[in-house]
Image: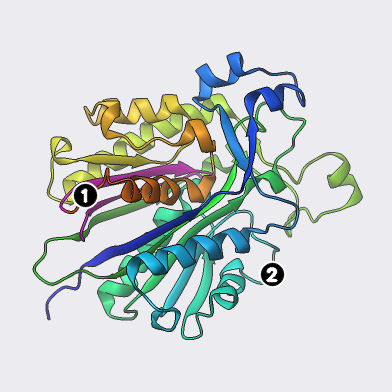
Amino acid sequence: MKEIRAAIAGTGSYLPEKVLTNDDLSRMVDTSDEWIYPRTGIRSRRIAGPQEQTSDMAAEAGRRALQAAGAAPGEIDLLVVATISGDSPLPATACLVQEKLGLRNATAFDVLAACSGFLFALDVARQYVRSGAARKVLVVGAEKMSAITDWTDRTTCILFGDGAGAAVVQPAEEGSGNGILASLTGSDGSLAPLLHIEAGGSALPTSAETLAAKRGFVKMDGHTIFKYAVRNMAGVALRAVEEAGLKPADVDWIVPHQANIRIIQAVAKTMDAPMEKVVATIERTGNTTAASIPLALDEAVRDGRIKPGDNVLFVAFGAGLTWASSVVRWGR
């Protein structure tokens, strides 16, 4: 039997209307644009409204991806949503998105791998398509990080934003050479305390005490995370390019997780790539966690930067700790 190669057939994204600038933040916590921008590369981020849920953003990004791929809702066999900020602990946010999009024939579930989540979900889609278990898969990364951010903690609230991005994955056109050429994932649970949310699970259920202590929000050792992020993102990116049978010089575009401009620059340097070959949205979106790669990808596809035949490298790093990289030869 010939191997079935999975390909991305269409992308979509969604950003909330509200823009929160660094100057806005300076009126909420002790910070400033002069402090935030040089250290992170962020000038503003989008914030979802009170009635705008993660599933709403995911559904809109998914709807746009379906339209771009020319896929009808009934054709989707599988829906995978990557998120750490789902509408509720139960059920899976993917089930809510399935209902909103009318994906009646799809199995739906969530993937939780933090900032690496979209690439983990993309790898799941790739395996389903390669095995023949699914013909068309909708992959979504969606986050309402504003709901799990402590807006009095200036070390974290400056970083995060809300949004969603999506992609339809299906078999590549036979003989085209397009599709997902390589996909690698990894994790190290011994480093979990570096980036986590303490309360809200079975180990430490939500209580009046955890709420008062703000233990239900994201906590991060940013300095240590930075070192691991640079090392692991660079390493997994190089391995993915090699597995794809390419050299760094063959990569036309790098679409990295949008966590920090310094991390992005370090990864580009490892790949010996100029920043002109990097798709960076962090200045306008901040860190949207699992949504950041598909948001950046959709922007670059729609504005014409990414063209058929281009070799595109995705790379991410997140809580867990997790890391992932994929190489895609872009098709029509």
Give yes or no for residue 40 being in the magenta stretch. Answer: no
- Numbered tag placed on residue 307 in the rendering: 1
Q: Is residue 219 left or right of residue 229?
A: right
Q: Amino acid at mark 1?
A: Lys
Q: Is residue 325 magenta?
A: yes
Horizontal arrangement in the rendering, residue 31 relative to residue 13 (left or right) = right
Q: Residue furthest top?
A: 34
* Residue at the image position 19 percent from the left and 47 percent from the top: 311
Q: Which residue is mark 2?
A: 90
Mark 2 crowd level (few <14, some 14–19, many ≥20, 10 Å Cα):
few
The residue stretch that appears in magenta: 309-332
Rate crowding at label 1 as few (under 14), some (14 to 19) or many (20 or more) other CA atoms within 10 Å. some
Count of labels in the image: 2
In-front residue for pair 259/23: 23
Mark 2 vs 1, N-terminal side: 2
Q: Residue at x 59, y 36 (%)?
A: 45
- Kind of residue at disc 2: Leu
Residue 176 is situated, as x and y percent measured from the top left of the image, at 11, 65
Question: Residue 24 in the image: x percent, y percent?
Answer: 70, 27
Q: Residue 315 falls in which quadrant of the image?
A: top left
Say which quarter of the image contains residue 9.
bottom left
Is 99 rendered above or below residue 261? Answer: below
Q: Helix or strand or loop: what does disc 1 sit on?
A: loop
The C terminus lies in quadrant: bottom left
Q: Residue placed farthest to the right in the image?
A: 208
For image coordinates 35% across by 75% down, the residue present is 136
Q: Main secondary structure of the magenta part?
A: strand
Q: Position of residue 109 (x, y in %)?
A: 53, 71
Q: Residue at x 73, y 55 (%)?
A: 203
- Residue 90 appears in the rendering: yes
